[in-house]
Amino acid sequence: MDEIYDPAAVEATAQAHWRALNAYRARENDPRFPKGKYYVCSMLPYPSGKLHMGHMRNYTLNDVVYRFMRSSGYNVMTPMGWDAFGLPAENAAIDKRVAPAAWTRANIADMKAQFAPMGFAFDWSREVSTCDPEYYRWNQWLFLRMLEQGIAYRKTQVVNWDPVDNTVLANEQVVEGKGWRSGAPVEKREIPGYYLAITRYADELLDQVKNGLQGWPEQVRTMQENWIGRSEGVRFAFPYERNGDQRRLWVFTTRADTIMGVTFVAIAAEHPLTLELAEHDSKLKDFIEECRVGGVAAADLATAEKKGVGTGFYVTHPLTRQSVEVWVGNYVLMSYGDGAVMGVPGHDERDFAFAKRHGLPIKQVIAVAENEFSTNEWRAWYASTDQSRCINSGAYDGLSYSQAVDAVARDLATLGLGEKKVQYRLRDWGISRQRYWGTPIPIIHCESCGAVPVPEADLPVLLPEDLVPDGSGNPLNKDERFLACNCPKCGKSARRETDTMDTFVDSSWYFMRYCCPGATTMVDERAAYWMPMDQYIGGIEHAVLHLLYARFWTKVMRDLGLLKIDEPFQKLFTQGMLLAHCYYREEANGRKRWFYPSEIEQEFDERGTPIRAVAVEDGQPVIYGGIEKMSKSKNNVVVPGTFIDRFGADTARAFVMFAGPPDQSAPWSDASAEGVHRFLKRLWSFCYEQRERIAAAAQLDHGKLDGAQKKVRHELHVTLGQALHDYQRLQYNTVVSATMKMLNALDGVKSLPDADALLREGGSILLRTLYPIAPHVAHTLWVELGYVRQYGDLLDAPLPHPADDALRQDELELVVQVNGKLRGRVTVQAAASEETIKETALGDPHVRQFVGDKPVRKIVYVKGKLINIVV
RNA sequence: GCGAAAGUGGCGGAACUGGUAGACGCGCUGGCCUUAGAAGCCAGUGGGGUAACCCGUGAGGGUUCGAGUCCCUCCUUUCGCACCA
């Protein structure tokens, strides 16, 4: 054993050992692990080629779960793969003139190499790349099954168009009116595409996120709930006549009790009736155009002015039979409900604003308390329905909210003009993307037969890998080899669909393919063994997108008989980001020049308060830019390579765990990281010095320990109990603290000549507690100190558990409070009666000083902890 | 605007179910070692005070023998949603 801790050597040896054992290859029903399977997985990364410490934090978290659960006796499996399709590869192709496939594969190789030094327990035999035909063929296969079931269908509708990325976006991918990736304001376009009927599953998706999924963070569950957005209400129609036809204008409302307050009907600019009426109305035409390009940021939209145009066209109120004018309003969304609303300005804030602006009548039909309603000043009576009463509403007068809704729905139903309906905010998932680097949609367009599915036997529809996009649209449209085909129905020459699938399709089930590498079907019985996943780990940014799609996909697979589970992820953990300090200086041209941390020196005052930071190059001050997300533009990205070279992977792992609670963002700090390295060095020196005593020590007999050793042993076992608890709740920062505490405690008894047994037991506890976090150094010391003979290889050595005799104490130190304030400490026999303890407390001279001659009103005794004397 | 979470030393952060606030680490101070530096080791480190003590978990109130923790009001920050009828 070397005297000096050499992480490079330690890590190389440990990794060679694990490699020789093929240690992370997981097998179904492995008899070595009677506790059963445990599947832990991190969201698969996009192979951008660059990994920083933030990634390492995420995967270390994953690795700690793996090692801890394996130490607990589970058959643990943790895989890794690549979300390999998508736009960055195409953009890189345009920039660098390389095919996306080559770029992506090179990045994957690069990233795997960057992972290697960290010692992660990935079972690489299960690796998945979503751009691999053996993977995406099953996207195509399931898509065809969905077509058969009517879950997938083709339609033309107004979509979100990203003018920079030149593609359609799903609603989930539009953030504040902008494309989630490009940041460009989204336009509205009418384009044909394929949709997946996720709304069919809306009820189930909602129910399980509300009432199941106990292992998910509340925040994510709420976000999904809001996204699905279930509303109960009434869908009804305003009849009208046009060109001799009897037609109906449908609307949806949650406030059917206000139906007698309708003074207009507002419809969306893209509503079919709008388009029809606009044919002979140039003002309306202009307004439609304004709505199409306008509406940049959705945040402004909510407060934006309620613009609109009257059409001069009238429909009939279904209950009063009065004529009501149709208006086109910019606040009506075509994509929700029927793209039309009844206008009740008396009781809806938006309708009110619209009516005020356009001079439309306002009618009160709900009784409200004095001063709560006036036409000049809106008060949000709308929000409270529990005590409202109808007025000015004919037959409905006096009814409460729910009575009125029931009565109105019944009357509308009698007329055949409406009924109760549940409306969702969730819309079907548009998966067509006008991009090259994705899964080809397996459809053939035939002039006589239309859109024809590719026969199963012809799968996969291979994506050509040698095309280099030039920025002028989808290169598949120009690739004759890909386009040319024959119609599977009539055999005539036809053209292939060139749209590809949204990459969220790829990530909707990769975690199931991990379970059954090489399966000749989409999934096989091995998936039934590993699924549902026990612990999923990923960023909060996927709270709705990926996690909702994956849940939907699982349910579709279940209904097709491929699986028996309802939900894919039992527990979800959303990890926080790793941040870093940044420093800059204003240049003469007004630009900011960002400094790398290595170019900066921080100065402190006598008390440790940072005063200023200076640049190493000239000693002149720079401006502290705060703690920010790691980004290239701010030069504050910490890369693993150089850090690991200097301090080793174990330090990197231990520090990213120590930096803060894993579910919160934490700042990287070179100084703190070196502190963790110092700890590992101290641990190494300690073990080096004590190696002979520990290796030769006898079994520990608690009864033979003296008071000082008992105290240390007690502390060790209490700390162990806390560490195990924190392991369970994934609070690894305090686990690292616990191992530091254990070392400090053992350090305190190393000079005692008869402490060999205690050192041996303590060392074994410390190393096993530390192992999931810093496995290389723990493994090496485990071997050197001779623990293998007793417990076996550290990979599968049983977890230590606090011993009862160590936790039990002969004497207790109790805190004495007077009126809730700490006034003294007393030591009592553990077996002492409450009476004796109280007397001892009162007898303490310091306590007596505070009690004085005031009468004691009450004495509270908290067992084993404290005594509070109330005077 | 609506909803959620969080505010604790110079810093990152502990305190599981109300029970010794500041664990553990960083930084800082003093000392030892060293020709010197680096590394290492020892001691100290919430604020005030010579001290006894007093004050301290964003602000204010409340419940309780006892509140960082529970309740109410407010402030700040972060995140999510954002015309969803």
Image (cartoon, coloured by chain):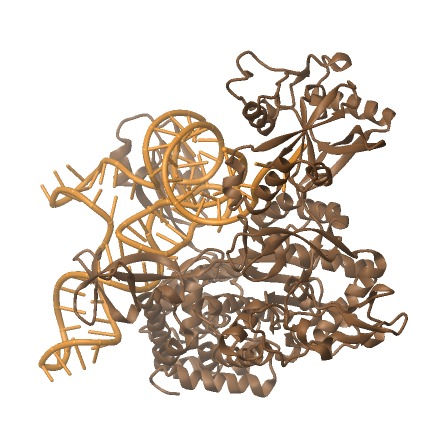
Chain colours: A brown, B orange
Question: How far from the left and from the top, in percent, is residue A241?
Answer: 81, 29
Q: Is B31 displayed left or right of A595 in the figure?
A: left
Viewer-closest of A512 and A30: A512
Question: Which quadrant holds residue A536?
Answer: bottom right
Point out the residue furthest to the right here.
A490
Question: Which quadrant holds residue B58?
Answer: top left
Question: How far from the left and from the top, in percent, is residue B42?
Answer: 23, 67
Question: How far from the left and from the top, in percent, is residue A582?
Answer: 32, 62
The answer, for residue A70, to whether it is visible in the render is: yes
Q: Is B40 displayed left or right of A640 in the figure?
A: left
* Quadrant where the N terminus of chain A is found in the figure: bottom left
Please give the name of the residue rendered at 53% of the width and 22% of the height, measured from the top-left corner: A378
Question: How far from the left and from the top, in percent, is residue A271?
Answer: 70, 40
* Quadrant where the C terminus of chain A is found in the figure: top left
Q: Look at the picture and state if A327 lies above or below A35.
A: above
Q: Look at the picture and state if A225 lies above or below A789.
A: above
Total numbered badges shown on the rendered structure: 0
Q: Look at the picture and state if A312 lies above or below A296.
A: above
Please give the name of the residue rendered at 54% of the width and 75% of the height, measured from the top-left corner: A93
The answer, for residue A31, to whether it is visible in the render is: no
Q: Look at the picture and state if A241 lies above or below A71.
A: above
Viewer-closest of A750 and A356: A356
Q: Is A357 displayed left or right of A657 in the figure?
A: right
Viewer-closest of A645 and A198: A198
